[in-house]
Amino acid sequence: MNITGIIAEYNPFHNGHALHARLARTETDADYVIAVMSGNFVQRGTPALIDKFIRAKMALLSGIDLVIELPPVWSCASSEYFAGAAAALFQQLGCVSSLCYGCETKDTDLFGQICTILNSEPPRYRQILNTRLKQGCSYAAAREYALLALLPDDVKPAASAALKKPNNILALEYQKALSASSPAITMHPVLRKDHGYHSQAVSGGYASASAIRRLLESQPEGFTQTLRGIMPYDAFCQLLNYMNQYPLLYENDCSQMLHYSLLKNAADGFSDYADCTPAISNKICRRLNDYTSFSAFCAAVKSKNTAYARISRILMHILLDIRQSDYALWRSRSFVPYARILGFQKESGALLTHLKKHSSLPLLTRASDAQKLLSDEGFVFFQKHLFMDAVYRALVTQKGGRIPKNEFQQQLALIQAPQPKIP
């Protein structure tokens, strides 16, 4: 059985994602396509726009055979941990043949040269990296400088351009993680079809998820017609149905809850939280009296060598109680203790049977089965997972006044859908 994996957020699902799913199937000759999808919190350190089960349904109705959740401990982590956890999930499933990812630069040889340096971290690389960090560079800038210093002159211009593209950074982390832990899974890149990860352009049937979120936040006249042109029809219907019941979430919807968490924990500082440092903790404490909102506080705490996105992730880690010790423990345990399945297509029942046969992870399809399927340690991880989903539900309830279903009330998404057409 030939199985191809995709790592995604689908926040929300759009035509570019549908095309990616179709190309993943056809270009790798896959029998099935599995997506590891971020849960209710996403990699830039914000709540997902839409509940994870609805995003899973969007994907299943638009070409994905089965969706597995990337737990929030890792779904709102840095690109290295985000990619490492997703790759570890695929590796532990035991039957995934290839990973198909979207990128802005389709050059696996170049990425291979970069990954060789990153995985081996030769002394000269470490020396240059540390020197640049001490000089006040951000980690991304320092890493790029150190890499370019070690790469051959003839590839430096291409490497410099590639390292400035956000999807290339994730692609690099995927290749780095798989080459270190699961070289049997082959990498299959496809070029992005939309206007770029951060682009706000909406035209030609394609738009980035960022542009769609901005459109949904502002809701200009005729926005639903615009959405209809850039999302698969079934995903579009799922979105409208969700919006009729619950509010969409944005970073500032976390403002009050985050403020309380910061005030409650300020006396002990924040150095114990994932990705935080004593210097960042001190700055958070110094600026706390000026707190007005999530986004304004991110802007106040960020600096020349600490990007807004990193601060956003740190604040989300504080809100969700994700500690440095959580990272250390679960990295040593191959990142995740189970595969939380959010849904699959009815026609893909054979895939689920195949996964059960080959996976070294328990396959969790119902929250109520967790205690009997998981080890004591795995169940502790799951309880933390439940807490984070409860925070998301509280945010939805606070904004919209209607209580969503909890993890035990949610039904596994079983979808019977025809294969989608290329948008």
Image (cartoon, rainbow, N blue to C red):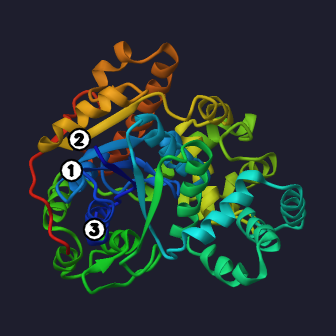
Whole-percent x, y for residue 124 in the image = 89, 61
Which residue in the structure is indicated by mark 3? Answer: 14
Q: Amino acid at mark 2?
A: Gly
Q: Specify whether 329 is left or right of 31.
A: right
Disc 3 marks a residue whose amino acid type is His
Dot label at residue 343: 2
Is residue 199 visible in the rendered image? The answer is yes
Task: Find residue 6 and name its label.
Answer: none
Circle 2/circle 1 CB separation < 8 Å? yes
Residue 293 visible in the picture = no
Percent coordinates x, y for residue 417 in the rendering: 10, 53
**On screen, 85 above or below 27?**
above
Q: What is the quadrant of residue 50 in the picture?
A: bottom left
**Considering the image in quadrants, where does the N terminus appear?**
top left
Residue placed at 23% from the left, 48% from the top? 65
Q: Secondary structure at mark 2?
A: strand
Disc with the residue nearer the chain's start (2 vs 1) = 1
**Is disc 1 placed on a helix, strand or loop?**
helix
* Viewer-closest of 55 and 155: 155
